Amino acid sequence: MVKIIGIIGSPRKGGNTEIYVKKALESAQNAGAETEIINLATAEIEPCTACDICKSTGECAIYDDMVEIGKKLQEAHGVIIASPVYFGSVTAQTKIFIDRSRPLRIDFKLKDKVAGAISVGASRNGGQETTLNTIHNFMFIQDMIIVGDGAPLGHYGGAGVSGAAGDAAQDEVGLETSANLGKRVAELAIKLNPDSK
């Protein structure tokens, strides 16, 4: 079965970002995909030290939760990465994840994985698109296939507005774009991997 992984890049467990990711993955399940959540708030991931060992071995010299996360990403057919907006970009947790994915790029282990992004800001124009752009840049560099939330809306991906914990449950636009993104990622992943139905 096609598998979609949702990565929650918020330092807050059970927060608004998680609500949007769960909505996207629920939609992916309804489209016929198996799903899994990886919550970076509970993962032990050290920053990249630029040791360059991965350039010669293809593996990271740091043995923490990123090793298992990397394996799961390679096995998945689609990936959704979500981050709240921190000063117009991704959180530290998301950036460490991105930096530590370098070994996966050595021989492009994530090539052709279907990928989408979700961002959450405190206001409707609160840096969501710049945050989505940071995530998309990571996906481009990994040679993934990037999708937005698809027709009829056709945005960059899921874009939510939430301040206090739990506000996401009332954000109809953010929930709709996240659901549409999950559906789009799943549908394309299924189309590209017909033997995995």
Image (cartoon, rainbow, N blue to C red):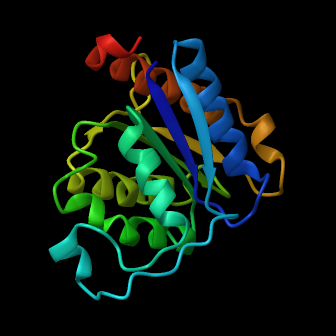
What residue appears at the point 75 percent right and 42 percent down from the top-left corner?
Answer: 168
Give the number of marks.
0
Displayed quadrant of residue 65: bottom right
What residue appears at the point 46 percent right and 70 percent down from the top-left corner?
Answer: 95
Displayed quadrant of residue 185: top left
Q: Is residue 48 left or right of residue 12?
A: left
18 relative to 164, above or below = above
Q: Which residue is more in the foreground, 104 or 26?
A: 104
Give percent across and percent down for residue 119: 54, 50
123 relative to 49, above or below = above
What residue appears at the point 60 percent right and 37 percent down from the top-left corner?
Answer: 36
**Residue 153 is at least partly visible in this image:** no
**Residue 58 is at least partly visible in this image:** yes
Q: Is residue 32 left or right of residue 133?
A: right
55 relative to 119, above or below = below
Give percent across and percent down for residue 87: 54, 74
Q: Which residue is more in the foreground, 103 or 40?
A: 103
75 relative to 196, above or below = below
Quarter of the rendering occupied by the C terminus:
top left
Give percent across and percent down for residue 35: 57, 30
